[in-house]
Amino acid sequence: MTRVLRLYPQLLRTGFAEAVAYRAEFLIWMFSTNMPLVMLAIWAAAARSGPVGSYSQEGFAAYYLAALLVRLMTGAWVVWAMTMEIRQGTMGLRLLRPIHPLLQWSADNLAALPLRGVVAIPVIAILLYVGRPEMSHDWFSWMLLIPALLGAWLIYFLVQAMIGTLALRFESAASLFDAWLGFSNVLSGYLVPLDLFPGVLRQLAAVLPFRFQLSFPVELMLGRWSRAEALQLLAAQWAYALVFLLVTRLAWRSGLRHYAAYGG
Amino acid sequence: MIEVERLRKWYRVHRRPPGLSAALRSLFHRTYEDVKAVEDVTFSIGAGERVGFLGPNGAGKTTTLKVLSGLLHPTEGRVAVAGFTPKERQRGFLEQITLVMGQKQQLLWDLPPSETFLLNRAIYDIPRKQYDATVAELTELLDLGPLLGKPTRQLSLGERMKCELAVALLHRPKVLFLDEPTIGLDVSMQAIVRGFVRAYNERFGATVLLTSHYMEDVAALCPRVMVIDKGRMIYDGGLPELVRRVRPDKRMLLRFSRPVERRDLDTLGSVIEHGDAEAIVQVSQSALQGAVARALSSLPLTDLTVEDPPLEDVMRDLFAQGRAA
């Protein structure tokens, strides 16, 4: 563990250098995360004549700007990196290093945060200007936001890693992740706030892990939970992250046994 | 340093004929086949040895190297490298080995090689003093100075391979698996790489297992060769012994002060090349002494050299014998 702590800053430095090297592509990719703004336009129009559920026009603005912020700050792309490296045969060289490849990928993904921040800052400014009355006024919620964002990123990253390990057996897994993404877009609250869902679907979304990727941190920012509820949800989020971590470890070990190391 | 006992590695591959109907059928029913990439291979390599691993494409060389480096799990058999079982991929094992693949790279593509050096320093936990000394040494041996600050994508193939070798050896591994390290390089760059591998082996007593299609690499570097064909080991021993066994003939290289008639050469042995100023004649080992004496006495020679047949010819004959058997 101490070795990892010693090593991680260098992994982050290298990851940042790579993110900067790809800066143009990176920025374009981030600007493509514009779905919350599209949804904001739709729902703001719908709420013109009166609130929809508990959301006024300002409420929707705050929700979708917060959703955009969460999405920007919790991005991961490990499933595509894994699939590409396995198919091209370069994964082997990564496996020869005495460091778990997932640790290295995690640093690559996290190291891009400062660049993401460049785009996130104007979003935060607009959010504070437009949605301030709708935001939480409890410092406790804002304090929980940091572990909640980290938990959201962990779930997103680990699910990708878990699905990516399937490529060790089947050479490709990205399409399976696309299926996950389809469910996630709906059930995480990315497209529609979960409390606007009809009863059964809302109950289902409440117990599935998707909400912890986006809806939970957004709701924290909007002050929709009491302190006790927020703590319970944070514990549930990290429990999911732990389960995904354990499953990913098992899937990784099993995948390596079947890895054919094609190429070269 | 390396012990391999009855190693087998089989792959399960999906087979289907070409065409749309076959593609559609394969959606519902797939035919699989076991490919025996390595079959019952046993060998042992001592510390500090340089061994050439030869065989035609698809013979099982790279598969064996991947098993030895822990990338592939053997189907059967026992493998030990530096006292470790490679498939367990323990940190102590990974710190002692390196695998250089001529067609794959570990350098970060958009960053200068120096960034990958720093990354590997952290990953292998190389003390600063040792790192500085190793980088200085590698920079001098491979003339890396002007290359370390350029983005990898802007380096030529030869420059990139020099940096690949350097980054692969930064942690001073004791076992080097080199898979076609000179592929695509020009002759002078091949010589630089060969010289470097030899220098590293002598300086650190590292064990080297090398595959290459360039027989020059093997002849210059490896006193011992192992030959594999269709997954089976067909030779393991010294290079001169292999040449003697497969091609017990010699080649006389003759240079003339004036042109000679073909029939004068035919009396010496089998003529392979005949020009105005030089010729190559193949002679059996037993007839060599007489042929040399006759050539010296009857031909207008300015020079006479006796050589083994080219290694490429030896290998071609060896694989042809294997297939005929």
Image (cartoon, coloured by chain):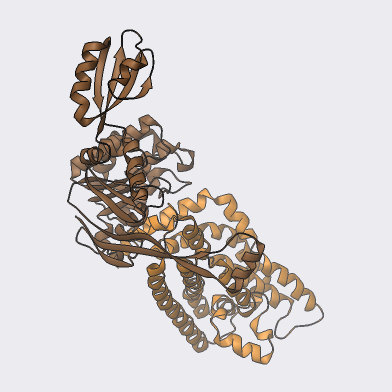
Chain colours: A orange, B brown
Q: Residue at x 71, y 75 (%)?
A: A58
- Residue A3 location, quadrant: bottom left
For residue B208, side relative to residue A162 (left or right): left
Q: Residue B208: percent from the left, percent from the top?
A: 25, 47
Nearest to the observer: residue B34 or residue B204: B34
Q: Residue B25: percent from the left, percent from the top?
A: 62, 70
Can residue B161 be seen here? yes
Nearest to the observer: residue B308 or residue B20: B308
Say if B264 sits above or below B167 in the image. Answer: above
Can residue B139 be seen here? no
Nearest to the observer: residue A22 or residue B223: B223
Say if A181 sits above or below A15 in the image. Answer: below
The residue furthest top is B258
Q: Residue at x 26, y 46 (%)?
A: B131
Q: Residue A187: percent from the left, percent from the top?
A: 62, 80
Say if B237 sits above or below B44 in the image. Answer: above
Say if B186 sits above or below B316 in the image. Answer: above
Q: Residue A13: percent from the left, percent from the top?
A: 41, 54
Q: Residue at x 43, y 43 (%)?
A: B112
- The mark total stands at 0
Which quadrant of the rendered structure holds the N terminus of chain B? Answer: bottom left
The residue furthest right is A49
